[in-house]
Image (spheres, grey):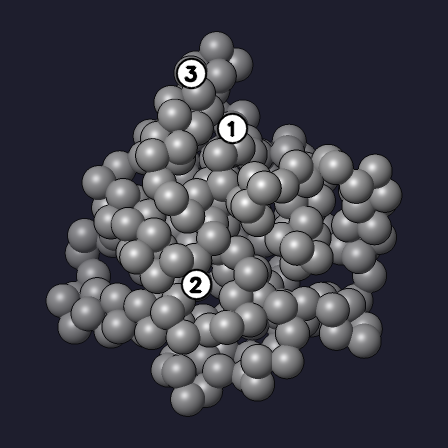
Amino acid sequence: MSEIELDPGADPGRAERARKLFSGPIAFLKSAPALQHLPAPSAPEIAFAGRSNVGKSSLLNALTNRNGLARTSVTPGRTQELNYFDVGEPLIFRLVDMPGYGFAKAPKDVVKKWRFLINDYLRGRAVLKRTLVLIDSRHGIKDVDRDVLEMLDTAAVSYRIVLTKADKIKATELEAVQAATEAEARKHPAAHPQVIATSSEKGMGIAELRTAVLEAVES
């Protein structure tokens, strides 16, 4: 069985370990505007990617049960650096908040800088265990998302799709979006076949996501 086919629920104690871990010490480490500013690759890393305004910062805050760990903004494209957060004391792994992509009004040089930074990070970071690609439940996968999925496939980086803002649509619509997203994920060689639906506001899927993060770290 390949790594991306592992069942996060296979270890009955993992969910409780994940709960305790995300209730413990978590701290902002640094922002890295370029590869030379990355911290030493001394711990596993889980990266978060997604379109601008997909709810990435809100999800990180919900995941860590902290209101202000990741800065939220109504201005798309604000984050243009890799933001690092240390989880555990002593350090167990790191969360990496990647710059949002797909903001149409971003200057071309900003878009180019983002692509170079992300490409180089994805292809050269040996400690990167998994990338979580966030997709807005209300919109599903868009072409700009597919570009990133293909980038991850090419870089052979294991990734998993996470639906955000699941409370903003009806349950029947969410079920259809999740099914369609999982069907598309199965077409990508580096994608985890199961999609997690979440809501930062309602707490939906957060425990499952914590467990999935720890599963990736421990795999």
How far, Cα to Cα, is label 2 from label 1? 21 Å
| Residue drawn where x is 18% and y is 52% of the image | 104
Residue at mark 3: 176
Task: Tell which of 126 and 178 is nearer to you.
Answer: 126
Amino acid of disc 2: Met
Which badge, 3 or 2, comes first in the chain's sequence?
2
Q: Residue furthest front?
A: 1
The outermost residue toward the top is: 172
Residue type, mark 3 in image:
Ala
Q: Is residue 42 left or right of residue 10?
A: left
The residue where tag 1 is placed is 166
- Look at 43% across and 63% down and name the residue there: 98
Seen from the viewer's position, the closer of residues 32 and 219 is: 219
Q: Is residue 121 visible?
A: yes
Q: Nearer the viewer, mark 3 or mark 1?
A: 3
- List x then y, in percent, for residue 94: 63, 68
* C-alpha distance separating marks 3 and 2: 28 Å
Question: Residue shown at 51%/28% (left/top)?
Answer: 166
Q: Amino acid at mark 1?
A: Ala
Q: Classify the position of the C terminus by image quarter.
A: bottom right
Q: Quadrant of residue 76?
A: bottom left
Query: How many angstroms separate mark 3 from mark 1 (CA)?
Result: 12 Å
- Residue that numbered label 2 is attached to: 98
